[in-house]
Image (tube, helix red, strand yellow):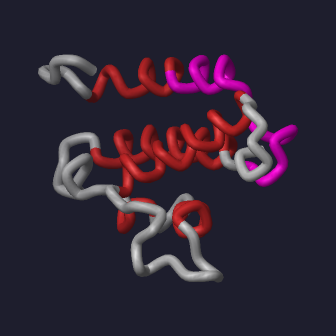
């Protein structure tokens, strides 16, 4: 769509998925680690679910954190949403309303573990 100059909400959903991966991994898609055979999307996908702790930004969650497994599970759920946003075929991508519903559910799942944090 973007290369052809067509505007589509499916492109916006794809971009949202990539941006979400960037934020949670603190890694840019143009990072030198990514080559023809490895992209940010494939790196995140390949890390799911057991290697996610190694690629998530250490400023977000650490193994020493209280409720680490629960927080990591929430991040895993967020990354699954991001991956679903970046399906190759625009027809297979979620719509933004479904993304919002999924993220709200994840937020409710995380709330019990964020006592004392403002703005969550």
Q: Residue furthest left?
A: 116
Q: Nearer the viewer, residue 114 or 83?
A: 83
Please give the name of the residue rendered at 37% of the width and 47% of the height, measured from the top-left corner: 23
Labels in figure, total:
0
Q: Which residues are magenta?
A: 87-103
Q: Nearer the viewer, residue 40 or 46?
A: 40
Q: Is residue 67 located in the magenta-colored stretch of the structure?
A: no
Left/right placement of residue 111 relative to residue 45 reads left
Left/right placement of residue 67 relative to residue 64 reads right
Q: Residue furthest front?
A: 5
Counting from the top left corner in percent of width and height, residue 107 is at: 42, 23
User: Overall secondary structure of the magenta stretch?
Assistant: helix
Height in image: 107 above or below 36? above
Counting from the top left corner in percent of width and height, residue 91 is at: 87, 38
Please give the name of the residue rendered at 73% of the width and 52% of the height, measured from the top-left corner: 3
Height in image: 34 above or below 5? below
Q: Nearer the viewer, residue 53 or 29?
A: 29
Height in image: 23 above or below 106? below
Quadrant of the snapshot with the N terminus:
top right
Quadrant of the snapshot with the C terminus:
top left
Q: Is residue 90 located in the magenta-colored stretch of the structure?
A: yes
Left/right placement of residue 77 relative to residue 7 reads left
Please give the name of the residue rendered at 63% of the width and 82% of the height, measured from the top-left corner: 36
Please give the name of the residue rendered at 25% of the width and 49% of the height, measured from the top-left corner: 61
Q: Quadrant of residue 85?
A: top right
Height in image: 115 above or below 69? above
Counting from the top left corner in percent of width and height, residue 89 is at: 84, 48
Q: Quadrant of residue 70?
A: top left
């Amino acid at each position: 769509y973007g290369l052809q100059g067509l505007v589509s909400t499916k492109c916006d959903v794809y971009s949202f998925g990539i941006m979400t991966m960037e934020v949670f991994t603190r890694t840019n898609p143009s990072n030198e680690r990514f080559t023809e055979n490895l992209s940010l999307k494939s790196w995140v996908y390949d890390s799911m679910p057991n290697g996610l702790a190694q690629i998530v930004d250490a400023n977000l969650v650490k193994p020493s954190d209280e409720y680490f497994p629960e927080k990591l599970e929430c991040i895993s759920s967020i990354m699954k949403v991001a991956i679903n946003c970046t399906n190759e075929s625009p027809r297979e991508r979620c719509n933004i309303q479904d993304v919002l519903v999924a993220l709200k559910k994840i937020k409710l799942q995380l709330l019990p573990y964020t006592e004392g944090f403002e703005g969550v």
